[in-house]
Image: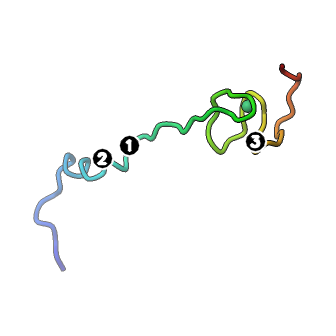
Amino acid sequence: MAVPKKRQSNSRSAKRRANHDRVEPANVAACPSCGEPRLAHRVCPSCGKYGGREIIAQAEAEA
Ligand SMILES: [Zn+2]
């Protein structure tokens, strides 16, 4: 069985992981019903709608 001769350096391990350890930017898109920025695949926090349906009932109707 092959055994590594030297311990791999922290730098070398970090370089290998560099791309998949990154933090991805949040996927923000405008809400199709109110136009406010909203996370993709999430209920809109400002109008409470998702997929054309109202999921969270709003306290008062907005213009
Ligand atoms: Zn909205």
Instruction: Measure the alpha-carbon separation of dots 3 and 2.
Output: 35 Å
Structural crowding at the residue carrying mark 2, measured as other residues with C-alpha within 10 Å and reported as few (<14), some (14–19) or many (≥20): few
List x then y, in percent, for residue 35.
69, 28
Residue at x-position 68% and y-position 33% = 31
The residue to which callout 3 is attached is: 50
> Is residue 19 depicted above or below 37 in this figure?
below
Residue at x-position 68% and y-position 41% = 42
Q: Nearer the viewer, residue 32 or 25?
A: 32
Residue 48 occupies quadrant: top right
- Disc on the earlier residue, 3 or 2: 2
In the image, taking residue 42 as reference, residue 11 lies left or right, namely left
Q: Which mark is residue 22?
A: 1
Structural crowding at the residue carrying mark 1, measured as other residues with C-alpha within 10 Å and reported as few (<14), some (14–19) or many (≥20): few
Q: Nearer the viewer, residue 53 or 55?
A: 53
Q: Quadrant of the C terminus?
A: top right
Under circle 3, the secondary element is: strand
| Type of amino acid under label 1 | Arg
Query: For the view shown, which residue lies furthest in the left direction?
Result: 5
Q: Quadrant of ligand 1?
A: top right
Under circle 2, the secondary element is: loop
| Type of amino acid under label 2 | Ala
Query: For the view shown, which residue lies furthest in the top direction?
Result: 63
- Please state the total of marks drawn on the protein image: 3
Q: Which mark lies nearer to you, 3 or 2? A: 3
Q: Which mark is residue 18?
A: 2
Under circle 1, the secondary element is: loop
Q: Quadrant of the N terminus?
A: bottom left
